[in-house]
Image: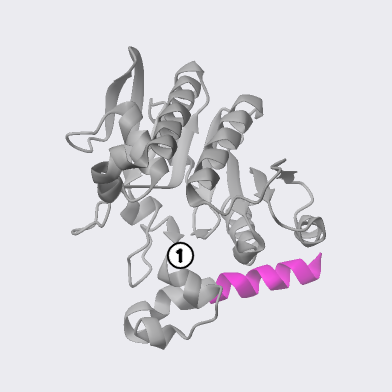
Amino acid sequence: MTTTCFIISIFGEKYLPFLPVNIFSINKSYNSEVSIIVLYNDISDKKIDEIKKTFPKFDFIKLNIDTVLSDSKSRLNTKLLFWNSILKDVSSKNIIFIDVDTLLLKNIDEIFYDDFDIAITYCDNEKPKFPINTGLLAVKKNSTSMYVFNEWINNLNQFIKYPKKFTTLYKKYGSGDQLSLMQTIGEPSDFSSIKTYNVNDVRCKIKWIGTTEYNNSYSTSVNENIRMIHYKSKWHNILLDKVPLDSIETRKDFGEIYDLYMKYEEMYNQYASSI
């Protein structure tokens, strides 16, 4: 039985408060039977060392980037390059790329029970802003998934070089990495559970999984079906900048989701103090 490997990327100290809580949530969900690799840049080694003391069995890899990547497109390109590099090097066959601003609530190895190459979360709520989100990406390491990653990087580079050519698609998908991923596999006519796509005549099996369960960023309450919550966009203001919840959303609607994050943050602090 292969051990699932989670890969977290973080660029800049602004997002550092998310990191230990994210790691704690993954470790807790897997009862410590998991591998985690953190790829980081533009964060002091001293601050990373403090987190490493709490999670000594996990790997923290400093990305060797000569310049601070203030441009979001360059960050995306760099993230994918290092994802691709780590995909080649990591020994686990089951890999999950996960955003740092997330909480994992349950073991999600059931994703890997099916026959596929890459699993992508599609937005299955009633009125999605964008059709997919790469905040969680599950990969079975094989020659097909590695080939698709290379093509994904090539397409992202085209977007970075010629952004005006992709204005319509950018508005549809919301980010360069999501846009270029859809370019790579082809825009789906529907989000069937598992569907085969031709990537330059290489047949790639894509598993579509709903954001309601696996990458939830819009629920107002927590239920047993939610496996991961994504605290993106407005939640950065609340959780990082400490903007009062009531000034952005009503406690009635989002208090439960907020309280859950506070609970995990407190559990992490207790865990860290016990080490």
Residue 93 in view here? yes
The residue segment tinted magenta is 262-275
Quadrant of the image occupied by residue 223: bottom left
The image shows residue 132 at horizontal and vertical percentages of 32, 46
Residue sitting at 56 percent across and 27 percent down? 93
Q: Quadrant of the C terminus?
A: bottom right
Instruction: Name above or below for residue 125 compared with residue 194.
Output: below
Please give the name of the residue rendered at 40% of the width and 43% of the height, measured from the top-left corner: 176
In this rendering, position of residue 161 left or right of residue 275: left
Residue 96 lies, in percent from the top left, at 52, 40
Tag 1 secondary structure = loop
Queried whether the magenta region covers residue 60, the answer comes back as: no
Position of 176 with respect to 130 (left or right) is right
Q: Quarter holding the N terminus?
A: top right
For mark 1, what is the residue?
Answer: 231
Instruction: List x then y, in percent, for residue 89.
Output: 66, 26
Count of labels in the image: 1
Lateral position of residue 64 relative to residue 73, left or right: right
